[in-house]
């Protein structure tokens, strides 16, 4: 047998076995990262879609957000994590490490490893710990996992369960072959009684026990509560002896952790847990089946799809009565119902949530119900949750997340409470800048947040508030709210115009007296903008691109400006930050001019050619970005992956369309990556995208048909997908500058909407 393009094929060509979709995934994609240069800032997540817990090998020190770096030589442990980003760091964490010989400190117990002796998949991880002669394997469930350790012949084989610092508790119960306890370590927010409870059940009697407080080891002691605690259990093992351990956690209680363990793992063997996780991944990845691409494209596609299916992750559990319950990061109580955490809407409103609404609406229905509980328990919708309110980033983009879900047809949750939540957030400044709208009193009075009133990133806030107002207006219409209530949001949707400076052709900060900020440098990052400059934020008019076209003087000038993003050298002014932040460096080295795909503000920009009669240019740049900026390799992203957002851009773009304007039932067309893609919808219907002539050279669309009828629009209606059917493209290596170029073929804009 030999491997060929992702297939196992006999030499005579008779027997062909298709590769399991999950085995195209490379969890190591994006792990070759560091604070000064992000190639994804990911870790090899071992888990199941949206599971409460994720597992990862840990190369970084305790508390290091960069828990796994591909370039590291040593593994310090295997960590339960809920970390959405290294910049947010972690909560609900502990680490498990098998060792040969009593080595307690995280440096002492660390072991050399090699990627040659590492197997990393979403459903199974395996690595050889060279310094200990121990092989560790992990298979996950939603709230639990099973470990399998293969030990050498030794009288001193140990497993160290490190509950970390900042207050933890461990207890060893030898008669039950069990470790229980809790960790309280978290990074963001302020919680009065946060605990991540755990239970770990072994299948072998303990020969040794002890506890460690980070400094001193106490042999034979089985219980410890301290700032830093670890439980140590040991065995005498034969060469090749296998010991399994089942572990689960809960944010509610040790009893709930034990219930999670019995429910999700119970008496299952390691191989059963592994097989179940693999089947679950194949079911979820199989919602979208792609054909006719290279094996590298298949790997990149499914690796990105995998990343899009983790966050936000479940924070809720199932109690003994079968009820959904959760510990609330908002009031510290145990409450009933759904709860999710671990996402920043500034990133994910753009593509991740629209993608869930398209391909996995049932999970976003749960997430919307969770948002209801966020508001009821905390008084605000979160803009960043990790697990509760995190004071970071700008905007009020929860409005988009709520609106797009309802407009895409999601039902069965308390939308009226969410309406109250989004209107409350739109008209009030929160107790921290991360909820509600900082500067709302200025925005509602002047139509913008002024540059000179001490509110940072004011132009970015204004532009995002204007789009968020549009999302609220769209939701209000869908809910049948009276015009007198929602017209103000439509009016505010046009506030972007107040920041456009015709003399420079850019969005620009504006002072309270109506004058523009001065001096002004469109290459200056930060200041009036968020992790970007005027070249990036000028395009943040998701709701009314035609209005922006008009401000710039028409279609030709608009296209010229888009072209200039790529042709202008990647020069920058970093004076606001006092140094080069990683997002700047990632733009600088990409050789794409001012286009900064490694961060979110400009990711939709390529598709704006559709609005100005030049879809062929969108096709060219989309394919170029996909080829250049994404690969299923450790350096495979061009910046932070960010909780599924940057991956969702790739997945959408590979399908051939993208949600430029969430809260509208349209997608802007790009160019499909594969010869055939089949989307199996939750309503039971399928939508197929066919491009039989597609190739590395043939990325231009010559013509298209939708269900056999001529199609010459630069957008695709959501209903066309939901109803099922076939969109077929005729592809070529030469652009058709006329196709979908008519003004009536352009996607939605508020100023021209009927």
Image (tube, rainbow, N blue to C red):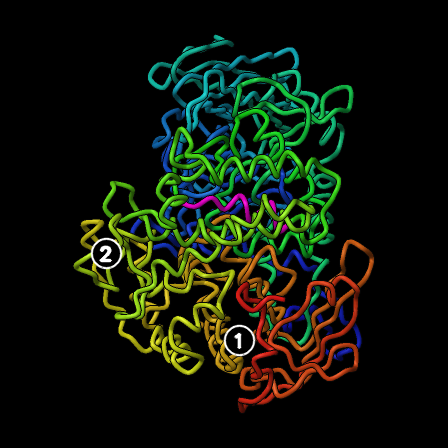
Please tell me which of labels 2 and 1 falls first in the chain: 2
Residue at image position (69%, 72%) is: 291
Going by the picture, which residue comes out furthest to the right? 684
Q: Can you tell which of label 2 and label 1 is closer to the viewer?
A: 2
Front one among 615 and 465: 465
Residue at image position (67%, 27%) is: 317
**Image quadrant occupied by the N terminus:** bottom right
Asked if 337 appears above or below 168 in the picture, the reply is below
**Which mark, residue 610?**
1
Residue at image position (78%, 19%) is: 321
Specify start and end residues of the magenta stretch as a single range. Answer: 394-404
Q: Residues within 10 Å of mark 1 (few under 14, many from 20)?
A: many
**Which mark, residue 515?**
2
Front one among 524 and 207: 524
Residue at image position (46%, 34%) is: 77
Circle 1 SS class: helix
Asked if 574 appears above or below 178 in the picture, the reply is below
Q: Residue 655: where, in percent of width, then height?
A: 63, 68
**Which mark, residue 257?**
none
Whether residue 402 appears in magenta in the rendering, the answer is yes
**Image quadrant occupied by the C terminus:** bottom right
- Chief SS of the magenta region: helix
Q: Residues within 10 Å of mark 2 (few under 14, many from 20)?
A: few
Whether residue 612 appears in magenta in the rendering, the answer is no
Would residue 370 be found to the left or right of residue 428 on screen? right
């Amino acid at each position: 047998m030999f491997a060929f393009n992702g297939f196992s094929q006999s030499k005579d060509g008779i027997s062909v076995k298709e590769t399991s979709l999950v085995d195209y995934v490379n969890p190591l994609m994006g792990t070759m990262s560091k604070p000064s240069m992000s190639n994804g800032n990911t870790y090899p997540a071992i888990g199941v879609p949206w599971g409460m817990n994720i597992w990862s090998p840990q190369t970084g020190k305790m508390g290091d957000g960069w828990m796994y770096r591909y370039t590291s030589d040593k593994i310090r442990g295997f960590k339960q994590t809920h970390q959405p980003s290294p910049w947010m760091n972690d909560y609900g964490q502990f680490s498990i490490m098998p060792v040969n010989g009593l080595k307690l400190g995280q440096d002492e117990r660390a072991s050399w490893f090699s990627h040659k002796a590492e197997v990393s998949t979403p459903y199974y991880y395996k690595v050889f710990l060279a310094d200990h002669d121990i092989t560790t394997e992990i298979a996950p469930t939603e709230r639990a996992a099973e470990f399998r350790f293969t030990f050498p012949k030794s009288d001193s084989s140990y497993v160290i369960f490190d509950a970390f610092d900042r207050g933890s508790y461990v207890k060893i119960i030898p008669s039950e072959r069990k470790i229980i306890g809790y960790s309280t370590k978290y990074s963001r927010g302020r919680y009065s009684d946060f605990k991540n409870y755990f239970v770990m059940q072994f299948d072998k009697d303990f020969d040794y026990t002890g506890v460690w407080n980070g400094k001193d080891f106490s042999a034979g002691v089985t219980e410890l509560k301290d700032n830093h605690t670890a439980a140590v259990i040991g065995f005498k093992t034969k060469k090749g002896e296998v010991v399994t351990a089942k572990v689960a956690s809960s944010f509610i209680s040790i009893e709930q952790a034990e219930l999670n363990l019995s429910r999700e793992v119970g008496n299952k063997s390691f191989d059963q847990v592994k097989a179940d996780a693999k089947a679950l991944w194949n079911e979820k990845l199989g919602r979208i089946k792609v054909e006719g691409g290279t094996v590298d494209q298949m790997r990149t596609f499914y690796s990105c799809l995998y990343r899009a299916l983790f966050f936000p992750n479940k924070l809720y559990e199932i109690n003994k009565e079968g009820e959904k319950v959760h510990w609330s990061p908002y009031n510290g109580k145990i409450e009933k119902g759904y709860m999710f955490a671990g996402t920043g809407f500034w990133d994910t409103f753009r593509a991740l949530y629209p993608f869930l609404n398209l391909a996995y609406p049932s999970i976003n229905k749960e997430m919307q119900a969770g948002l209801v509980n966020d508001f009821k328990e905390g008084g605000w919708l979160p803009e960043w949750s990790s697990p509760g309110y995190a004071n970071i980033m700008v905007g009020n983009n929860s409005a988009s997340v709520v609106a797009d879900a309802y407009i895409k047809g999601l039902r069965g949750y308390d939308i009226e409470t969410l309406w109250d939540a989004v209107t409350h957030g739109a008209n009030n400044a929160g107790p921290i800048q991360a909820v509600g709208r900082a500067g709302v009193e200025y925005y509602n009075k002047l139509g913008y947040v002024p540059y000179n009133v001490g509110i940072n990133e004011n132009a970015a806030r204004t532009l995002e508030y204007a789009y968020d107002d549009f999302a609220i207006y769209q939701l209000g219409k869908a809910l049948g709210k009276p015009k007198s209530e929602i017209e103000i949001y439509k009016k505010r949707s046009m506030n972007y115009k107040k920041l456009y400076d015709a003399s420079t052709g850019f969005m620009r900060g504006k002072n309270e007296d109506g004058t523009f900020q001065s001096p002004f440098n469109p290459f200056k990052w930060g200041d009036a903008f968020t992790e970007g400059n005027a070249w990036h934020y000028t395009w943040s008019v998701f709701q009314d691109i035609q209005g922006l076209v008009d401000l710039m003087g028409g279609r030709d000038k608009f296209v010229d400006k888009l072209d200039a993003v790529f042709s202008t050298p990647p020069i920058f002014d970093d004076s606001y930050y006092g140094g080069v932040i990683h997002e700047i460096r990632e733009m600088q080295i990409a050789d794409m001019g001012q286009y900064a795909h490694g961060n979110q503000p400009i990711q939709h920009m390529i598709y704006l050619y559709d609005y100005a009669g030049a879809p062929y240019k969108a096709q060219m740049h989309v394919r170029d970005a996909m080829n250049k900026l994404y690969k299923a390799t450790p350096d495979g992203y061009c910046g932070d992956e960010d909780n599924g957002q940057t991956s969702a851009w790739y997945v959408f773009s590979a399908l051939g369309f993208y949600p430029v304007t969430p809260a509208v039932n349209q997608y802007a067309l790009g160019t499909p990556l594969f010869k055939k893609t089949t989307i199996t919808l939750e309503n039971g219907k399928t939508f197929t995208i066919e491009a039989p002539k597609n190739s590395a050279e043939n990325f231009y669309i010559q013509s298209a048909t939708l269900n056999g009828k001529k199609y010459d629009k630069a957008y695709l209606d959501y209903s066309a997908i939901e109803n099922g059917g076939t969109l077929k493209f005729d592809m070529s290596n030469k652009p058709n500058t006329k196709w979908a170029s008519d003004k009536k073929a352009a996607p939605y804009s508020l100023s021209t909407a009927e």
